[in-house]
Each structure stands twice: as C-alpha cells, then as structure tokens.
Amino acid sequence: MVSMTAAGAASRALWVVALALIALAAIDRMKPSSPRRAVVRVDNKPTPLYQEPDQQQRRRAITNLSAGAVILGALIACIVGFLFTIVLEVVGGLLRA
C-alpha cells in the first residue's frame, strides 16, 4: 500500500506542471524560424447564390419526393399494423386465459 499526503500530491503536481512547461518551451524552439508562405489564388468572379430550377427539375423533385413518401408511408403502415396485430394477439390471449 502506498499512501500519499496532500503536500506530496501537491509537490508532484507542481513537478508535472513544471516539466510540461519545459517540454512546451523546448517544442516551441524546434519550430522553423520563418513560416512557409503558401500562395493562394483568389478568383473575384461573381457567382450566383441561387439559381431557379427549371420545370423538368421541379417535376423530377416532386415525383421523387412523392414516391419516397408513398414508400415510407407503406413501410410505416406495415410496421404499425404488425405491432397492432401482436398487441391484439397478446391481449386476446390474456382475455382467453
């Protein structure tokens, strides 16, 4: 068993902080003296923020969303129906007994 006093814990904590600061100073000295400069090309052309979709894109989006809604609705209806059937079977079994 190892026991430690509050003073011992505090002194160890101070040692850890001091060693961390020394390591940070050593790492800071290792970095290059002048940072590398990256060339960034800037294009000042105006870009449209929003472009109105054409009629074909609108129809395709409505068709896809409608088909997805029908499929999701059918899936949810099947799951709810299946769960409802299970609940009715359990309740019916309890009432029969």
Image (spheres, grey):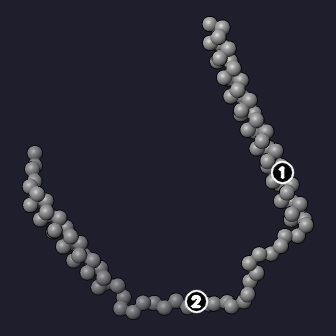
Q: Position of residue 53 (x, y in %)?
A: 84, 70
Asked whether, in this view, residue 86 is left or right of residue 19, the answer is: right
Disc on res. 40: 2
Q: Toward the viewer: 56 or 84?
A: 84
What type is the residue that disc 1 sits on?
Ser
Q: Is residue 31 above or below residue 55?
A: below
| Of callouts 2 and 1, the N-terminal one | 2
How far is disc 2 from disc 1 in space, using C-alphas?
A: 45 Å
| Amino acid, disc 2 | Val
Pointer 2 and pointer 1: residues touching (CB < 8 Å)?
no
Q: Which residue is mark 1?
A: 66
Q: Position of residue 21 (x, y in %)?
A: 23, 76
Identify the residue shown where x is 49% and y is 91%.
37
Horizontal and vertical percent for residue 9?
A: 13, 59
In percent of width and height, residue 12 lies at: 14, 63
Camera-nearest residue between 60 and 22: 60
Question: In the image, 28: left or right of 95?
Answer: left
Q: How dense is the environment of label 1, judged by Cα within 10 Å: few (below 14), some, or many (20 and up)?
A: few
From what the image shows, is residue 26 above or below residue 93? below
The quadrant holding residue 54 is bottom right
Q: Is residue 4 above or below residue 97?
A: below
Compared across the picture, whether 70 is left or right of 30 comes to right
Q: Which numbered dot is residue 47? A: none
Q: Quadrant of the C terminus?
A: top right
> Measured along the vertical axis of the image, is residue 81 above or below residue 20?
above
